[in-house]
Image: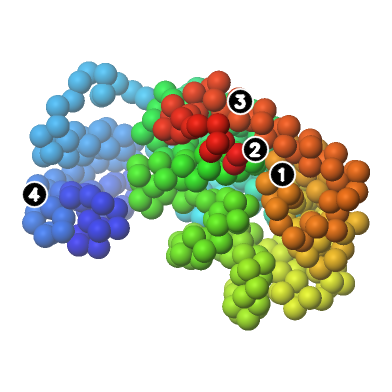
Amino acid sequence: PKALASEADVDRVVMGTLLRAGDQLRVSVQLVEAPGGTLLTSHTVQSSMGDLFHLQDDIGQRIVEALSLPLTSQAMAPVPDAPHDPEAYELYLRANEMARTYDGLPRARHLYELCLERDPGFAPAWAHLGRCHRVIGKFIEEQPDSEARAEAAFRKALEINPGLSIAHKFYAHLEADMGQPQQALQRLVAQATVNGNDPELFAGLVHACRYCGLYDESIAAHAEARRLDPNAPTSVEQTLLMAGDLERLFEFPNPLVVAGADDGIRVIALGLSGRRVAAREAAAEMCRIPRIPAFRAWSEALFAWVERRRSDVLARLARLQGLKIQDDPEALFLEAWLLCDLGEHDEGARLIERAVGKGYCPSRVLGNRPEFEALRERASFQAVLAQADANRLRAREVFREAGGERLLGQARTPSSSGS
């Protein structure tokens, strides 16, 4: 309880055990004061799997009563994303656990599909199935229709429950990948304006704002997500890299999430800041961690970049061909950044043009970083830079018109609006 009180910023903890024998369940729950560990109330109930949701409601009611919180009839009303089938719900929970690792996603996808065969009206399962389609196509398997399948699943989730935050967040990530970051930005601001207590929406805004080149807004969204949930994972490290705030990035602890593609951000930041020894150590550590093939190729590309081996960087990046990661504009830009740092300016310029053509707005980076100095006299590069900046200015207007500044407390003077 002491650790939970500190890490989760709570003063009450629900603890318990669940035993299952065939179709029978026995659940014991305790409400415990934190950090002292004083038992406030306990409750034990036994039921069949068929009564699972009644059991859930019973336990919830007892906990609320112990907290002395008044419940209105509206608060007790069924929500549109409530499960309807106990066995389908079990499949959903098992899938959620498998989906915590990238190599578990194909199996998780199968379990979500089985869940939805039994309970096709369960919106969260549609949302998570959509994420599986998107991430598997992006990092694991060549699937030309993965984005279409993901979008169909997200639309189904939102058709069932238009306010399902996790579906809006996952959908916004897909929109950013597909070159529609302003649409993602608008979606998340609108939802967060209605449901301002959901950290998932603000975590999504960290991502969408960065794709639109709105780095200050992205950092503000991270702060709001962490205010609502101190442990909410966001992609703010990527934003700090793009904003050039590398010292602040280094202050962040290593993320408590499954290692993936994003943990290379620290390697890039170390290398760009001249800390090559530390960058090499971090890249070597990435290479030692077991990974899916795409992340192994990315880790080896970063290691080769730190060691200034151009041909090996290009060879490792070539292994990503066929996966949707090569259509993600942010991934394209990061590859371009590394290649320009190695002097591969023609290939870097080609990737930058593709990234900006898909709505990515790195104008601040392109205009400031020395790695792009050799490109700045090219008319084609100047045109791409102008396009990126125009997209960023339009995104800022979309953000303002949607109510983003009010949402994040971001009212600004003209002199501070250059993010």
Instruction: Kindly indicate whether the residue at mark 3 contacts the one at mark 4 (C-beta within 8 angstroms).
Output: no
Mark 2 sits on what residue? 212
Distance in Å between CA atoms under marks 2 and 3: 11 Å
Regarding residue 119, the answer to whether it shows in the image is: no
Return the residue at label 3. 397
Estimate the spatial distance between the alpha carbons at disc 1 and disc 2, rounded to whole Å: 10 Å
The Cα–Cα distance between marks 3 and 1, rounded to whole angstroms, is 16 Å
Q: Position of residue 290 (x, y in %)?
A: 62, 72
Q: If you read the primary sequence from the N terminus, does the residue marked by circle 2 or circle 4 appear first?
A: 4
Mark identifier at residue 40: 4
Relative side of 389 to 207, left or right: right
Residue nearest the viewer, comparing 298 with 404: 404
**Which three-letter amino acid code belongs to the residue tagged 3?**
Glu
**How far from the left and from the top, in percent, is residue 29?**
19, 49
Quadrant in which residue 237 is drawn:
bottom right
Neighbour tally class for label 3: few under 14, some 14-19, many 20 plus, Cα within 10 Å: some
Say which mark, if any, is on residue 363: 1
Query: Number of marks in the image?
Result: 4
Q: Earlier in the sequence, mark 1 or mark 2?
A: 2
* Amino acid type of the residue tagged 4 in the rendering: Leu
Instruction: State which quarter of the image contains the N terminus.
Output: bottom left
Task: State whether residue 288 is above or below residue 83.
Answer: below
